[in-house]
Image: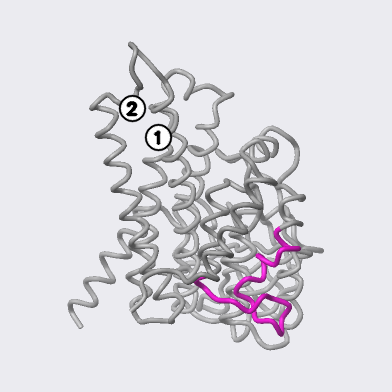
Amino acid sequence: MNFDFDDDQKALQRAVREYLERESPLSECRRVLEGEARYSETVWRGAAEMGWLGTAIPERYGGAGLGALELALVAEEVGRALAPIPFASSIYLVSEALLQLGSEAQKERYLPQLAAGTCIGAFALQEGPGHGNGQALATVLKDGAITGDKQPVLDGDVAGLYVVACRVGDQPRLALVGAGEGVKATPVACIDGSRALARLQLSGAQAELLGDGGDAAAIEHLLDRAATLMAFEQLGGADQAFAITREYVLDRYVFGRPVGSFQAIKHRLADLFVDISLARSNSYYAAWALAGSADELPVAAAAARAAASDAFDLAASEMVHMHGGIGFTWEADAQLFYKRAKLLALTLGSPTHWRDRLTLRLARESAA
């Protein structure tokens, strides 16, 4: 049994990393954070030209025809670079929703646009603080018109296509909504200014069910798939934060010796390495389950998401602390990792939410 990625997958990951190191250094993330742009159009266009956006989209829909494992590796590199692009929204959520639930006509219409980057997708689930389990939805779809208020919506103000969780009768469903009349996306303040958040107001906008609309179980399955890919993005961010911090404490001298030679720093770095290794192990397991559509995906996805959120949060926090006084300054890059860690941890549900899901799913397995 092979527990490693194959040579072609590793080559893809190297190509993505090399491109992002060249075209999306941390200065690009800072440029979006400090400027008026909502995302990096240059990096987004390059990602489309290199085919990453269509990594897991079949060739007949304009994609590269690869799979979930390859997409997970791309996600890790996007996270490592803190790339300020709507990759998660458009690819982990909207493209995956279309692939899993969409009708053939919907796939043929939208997937080529998503793969080419000419259309950006956004997933609208939450309806305010604490909401996000796909139940008790206030957004209503009736007679082809959808009405409701969604916030926060990641990349909602730059999207041209929305997958919206709504209620049809008393059942949760997913609907496709295009930007246009009856759709108002307003930017909202966010801890991470390098990523766009919006309030999406739907007032009788034209909408259609995504496939047959799915149900609560289908929405949960979609979130499990997205959580696995998001875990890889968090893993990449944690790994890079650790690498930068380790290099800094080895190069920075105090009292005639490297900061990293002090036992207290060594212990903290060791703890961080263990957390990242645990997150990587859980993420690889979830990727295996995702690629093989295994029954283990619900448990594996929840474990990966919780572990990766914790690892990235710790790595970003330790990055700030171990850089000492400069770690708290605006000029230091530590803030970029800290802000991204906090944003991603709350996207698709908090770490506590995913730990609760993990506990419930393990209890169900034990009772079965």
- Residue beneath disc 2: 260
Instruction: Say which element carries label 2.
Output: helix
Residues shaded magenta = 47-69
- Expressed as whole percent of the image width and height from the top left, the position of residue 152 reads 58, 52
- Which of marks 1 and 2 precedes in the sequence? 1
- Vertical side of 15 occupied by 222: above or below: below
- Residue beneath disc 1: 246
The residue nearer to you, when weighing 200 against 22, is: 22
Q: Residue at x 34, y 12 (%)?
A: 256
> For the residue carrying disc 2, how many other residues have a C-alpha within 10 Å: few (<14), some (14-19), or many (20+)?
many
- Vertical side of 238 occupied by 140: above or below: below
Whether the magenta-drawn stretch holds residue 55 is answered as: yes
Q: Amino acid at mark 1?
A: Arg
Where residue 30 sits, quadrant-wise, is: top right
The residue nearer to you, when weighing 296 against 292, is: 292
Q: Quick one: which residue is furthest to the right in this view?
A: 181
Report if the CB atoms under discs 2 and 1 are less than 8 Å apart.
Answer: yes
Q: Residue at x 62, y 39 (%)?
A: 193
Instruction: Say which element carries label 1.
Output: helix
Q: Amino acid at mark 2?
A: Gly
- Expressed as whole percent of the image width and height from the top left, the position of residue 63 reads 69, 76
